[in-house]
Image (cartoon, rainbow, N blue to C red):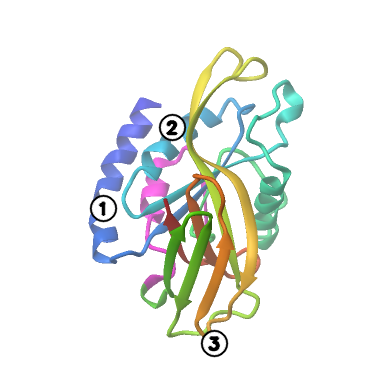
Amino acid sequence: MRQTIIAAAAALSAFAGVAEAEGKRVTVVELYTSQGCSSCPPADALFSEVAARDGVIGLALHVDYWDYIGWADTFADPTFTKRQKAYAVAAGERMVYTPQIIVNGATSIVGTDASALASALVPAGGASAPDLKLSRSGNRLKVSATTSAPLPKGSFVQLVRYIPAASVTIERGENAGRRLTYTNIVTSWKRVGEWDGSKPLSLTLDAPGDQPAVVIIQSPGPGAIFVAAVAE
């Protein structure tokens, strides 16, 4: 696992310059993981390294389909399992698995493959990505966006909330006896609107509490992510 993390750090160092050159463009990295999966801790560690990088929004979604083997994941949500299955259907795949990483809604990678992940870390949307701005005041989040190119009909705007870090002692199951630390644990993922880019986007959303708020604009499917931003 240590070699995996070191390899990822070396490979990702080159990406830092790309993120800076692209200004505020970011890469969205979704990790599908489970506390009950013995293959997941190395992926969780790699994800933690990647999520700390400038230019990356890392979001860990804990699924519930391993709960039956002895330990119910304390962060799992069936809606995250549903999202992962929707990706599989869109890609023509019959099964889902952990650990899985999906980059920018388009590239699927085994969660421990540091080399493939490093190669996939490019800003979402490319040069034609919409311009997305967030402004948070108290429990309110103002979202505004413009684009020079139309988006597919049915593209949706999503609000994601997450816990930056938490440690859990696993008492049963494949990881019994281990205390594991998780990063950017998604607590909710909600669709809050649709936008085709024909006119500027302007939304004001409820964002109570102190958890960071991420807004993601994505093609239907789910498919490619056009742009994302985080309000700490």
Disc 1: which residue: 16
* Residue 172 image offset from top left, x and y in percent: 67, 16
Q: How far apart are marks 1 and 2 (CA)?
A: 19 Å
Of callouts 1 and 2, the N-terminal one: 1
Q: Distance between the residues labelled 3 and 1?
A: 33 Å
Amino acid on which the number 1 mark rests in the picture: Ala
Identify the disc placed on residue 148. none
Relative side of 130 to 74, left or right: left
Q: Which residue is drawn at 50% across and 53% down?
A: 213
Disc 2: which residue: 45
Amino acid on which the number 2 mark rests in the picture: Ala
* Residue 86 image offset from top left, x and y in percent: 69, 57
Q: Residue furthest right?
A: 68
Of callouts 3 and 2, the N-terminal one: 2
Disc 3: which residue: 198
Amino acid on which the number 3 mark rests in the picture: Ser
Q: What stretch is highlighted in magenta?
A: 107-126
- Does the CB distance between marks 3 and 2 fall below 8 Å? no
Above or below residue 162? Residue 68 is above
* Residue 198 image offset from top left, x and y in percent: 54, 87
Please tell me whether mark 2 sits on a helix, a strand or a loop. helix
Q: Which residue is drawn at 65% across and 50% down?
A: 84
3 vs 1, front mark: 3
Please tell me whether mark 1 sits on a helix, a strand or a loop. helix
Residue 147: quarter of image: bottom left
Neighbours of disc 2 within 10 Å: few (<14), some (14-19), many (20+):
many
